[in-house]
Amino acid sequence: MYGRDKSENRLLKLVQDGLPMTLWQQLQLTVQLSVPAIISQLSSILMQFIDASMVGSLGAEASASIGLVSTTTWLFMGLTTACATGFYVQVSHLLGAKDGKNARGILRQSIVICLLFSIILTAIGCAVSGPLPRWLGGEEAIRDDASAYFFIFMLSLPAMQINVLASGMLRSAGNMYTPSALNVLMCLLDVVFNFLLIFPARELEIFGLGITVPGAGLGVRGAALGTALAAIAVAGLLLRALCMKSPQLRLDREKGSFWPTSACMKNAFGIAMPMGCERIVMCGAQIMSTVIVAPLGTIAIAANAFAITAESICYMPGYGISNAATTLVGQSIGARRKDLTWRFANISVIMGMAVMAVMGVIMYLGAPAIMKAMTPVPEVVGLGAEILRIEAFAEPMYAASIIAYGIFVGAGDTLIPSIMNLGSIWAVRLSLAALLAPQYGLQGVWTAMCIELCVRGAIFLVRLYGRKWLARTSK
């Protein structure tokens, strides 16, 4: 695993040392960082796909119970991501400036702050888990399962916070392969735990032999518990890789304090606060979208949830390239290389839009098969395939917004992009969805989403090529 990292670190060292890089070397480094990041993102969304497909076999109501609270789980995960980003962007800049000692100091402080933050979020989430499905407009039949799923998810949030923080720190150091490999492992563990926890004990015939397979028969609760156990197992492995094995960030290289300093907290707050507010308002908008969808019935809720999961597989490559762009831009800025920062930004955006355009074509053509893989209910499959095909047209412009945002995060420029995200989703998506849903149903909601993603991509490209965010680099 670390053998592959040496090649990446060699190219990153050219960035840190101020040495010239050919276009081929820039492309090579971008691809090397992007591919494992894409694999990591795909593995995380595959966990949701696995949960959805396994629970989907239990019927539309079981699927709808998870779909109802999914946007709220994204809200809490978004907040943990914002908190972690405030620290690992600082580490990226320090490593770009070859200041490993202070980078490790930021890491120590981040572990304490992020854990405390996630524990507070866990307490809040558990407190609202009971009434949440009712607040979201869920039908009586799915409220108990939805509440239980959300409660178990919230109990695992500190482990998920560690996963996000450790993965971000390793990526900031140029190590994409370790978090990617461990996220794939988490996906595999999720399959095993779900297989044992969702379904009851049963007889399976393998090569003509009858085998009794154990099972807890917990249904929706088993899906949440399986994901939680997988996250907890991998959190420990990620911390070990970061704090004991990372050549640049291992904490045994010198003694240091875990007590937060005012300078670190101020910088983290400046990066994380706009992101956190954005995630709250963005997920609030997604929750409002759920409220718009909920009156359309159980079939619409289930189709919406499955289609969101399926579409996530399409745009995860964009998030992987965005993670790589954050690392490349952060280290280039730390090394005070404005020219290289701009070239990495261009390479990342063009690559991301091309990849997601191809994924959009695949999603359009394969929409029915993708939906059938998650649910046997014909009505859900038909409706889900229809709305997926609407969304396919927005993928290239969605890529532009995702990757440009990652570039801005690497530059520590989060306030204006966060405001742009908020304005787009609230002014365009929700207003259009509210207008179209009564007449066109779920298809109207997804048409509004498609239009909004295209608008968002356009405004992010305008800001990117306006170059004002480059003011953080030296001239």
Image (cartoon, grey):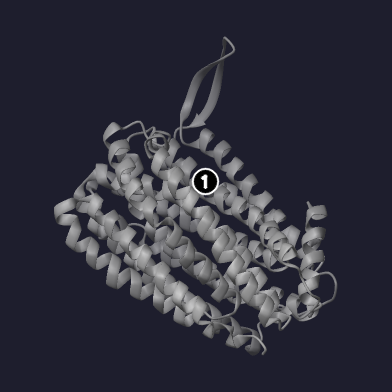
* Image quadrant where residue 258 sits: bottom right
* Image quadrant where residue 174 sits: bottom right
**Can residue 110 be seen in this snapshot?**
no
The mark total stands at: 1
**Can residue 188 be seen in this snapshot?**
yes
Q: Is residue 273 above or below residue 453?
A: below
Check disc 1 and report the residue beneath it.
47
Q: Residue at x 43, y 44 (%)?
A: 363
Crowding around mark 1 (Cα neighbors within 10 Å: few <14, some 14 to 19, many 20+) is many
Front residue (pair 110, 1)? 1
Q: Residue farthest to the front?
A: 23
Q: Residue at x 41, y 37 (%)?
A: 374
Front residue (pair 104, 94)? 94
Q: Position of residue 143 (x, y in %)?
A: 29, 49
Q: Residue farthest to the top?
A: 208
Q: Is residue 61 left or right of residue 435?
A: right
Q: Is residue 96 left or right of residue 387?
A: right
